Image (spheres, rainbow, N blue to C red):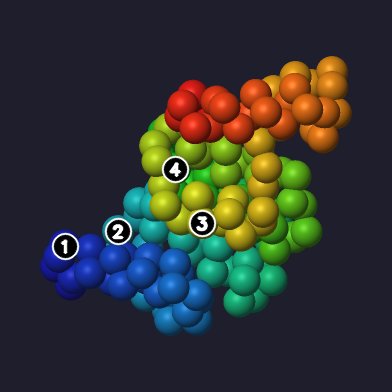
């Protein structure tokens, strides 16, 4: 297989995984990593393994290794966060999604965070979320795009 064929397999696998078809993604990515190993392909493969074969611990190790090799790719944090969600570790998943957003804007991470219904922490942590100062300061800063 040529390099473009492998790239096509990886692209097809990523598109399928992001579209929710992890069975197809698993097939494509398993073939792709046998031919050429890349951290991105491995993290998407790890997500598919966790979702399709419930190999969560193995998938987490794969993603952590990919992050060690390429720590600035938000897709690694996306997939590791998704795996943590599958394992029921919502707090860890949110932390990972936010960490991935620090490196680059990723629409899939934004969609996951929206799906989780996340709210930003209150501006003044020592006051409750419902306190008028927190509420109106948050509204004003959001309108000014400072938050």
Q: Nearer the viewer, residue 10 or 98?
A: 98
Residue 133's label in the rendered image is none
Residue 74's label in the rendered image is 4
Residue 79, can we see it? no
Q: Is residue 60 above or below residue 52?
A: above
Q: Position of residue 129 (x, y in %)?
A: 80, 33
Kindly identify the residue that appears in the image at 46 percent across and 26 percent down. 144
Left or right side of 129 for 96: left
Counting residues from the N terminus, which is met first, the one under dot 2 or under dot 1? 1
Counting residues from the N terminus, which is met first, the one under dot 4 or under dot 2? 2
Q: Which secondary structure, mark 1? A: helix
Q: Are marks 2 and 1 in contact (CB under 8 Å)?
A: yes
Counting residues from the N terminus, which is met first, the one under dot 3 or under dot 4? 4
Q: Are marks 2 and 3 in contact (CB under 8 Å)?
A: no
What residue is pinned by disc 2?
Answer: 36
Q: Nearer the viewer, residue 141 or 86?
A: 141
């Amino acid at each position: 297989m040529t390099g473009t064929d492998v790239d096509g397999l990886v692209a097809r696998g990523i598109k399928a995984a992001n579209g929710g078809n992890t069975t197809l993604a698993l097939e494509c990515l398993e073939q792709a990593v046998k031919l050429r190993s890349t951290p991105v392909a491995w993290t998407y493969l790890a997500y598919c393994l966790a979702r399709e074969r419930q190999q969560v611990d193995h998938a987490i190790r794969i993603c952590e290794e990919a992050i060690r090799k390429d720590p600035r790719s938000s897709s690694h944090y996306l997939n590791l966060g998704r795996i943590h969600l599958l394992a029921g570790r919502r707090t860890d998943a949110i932390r990972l999604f936010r960490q991935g957003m620090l490196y680059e804007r990723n629409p899939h991470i934004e969609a996951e965070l929206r799906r989780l219904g996340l709210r930003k922490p209150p501006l003044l942590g020592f006051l409750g979320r419902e306190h008028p100062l927190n509420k109106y300061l948050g509204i004003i800063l959001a309108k000014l795009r400072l938050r």
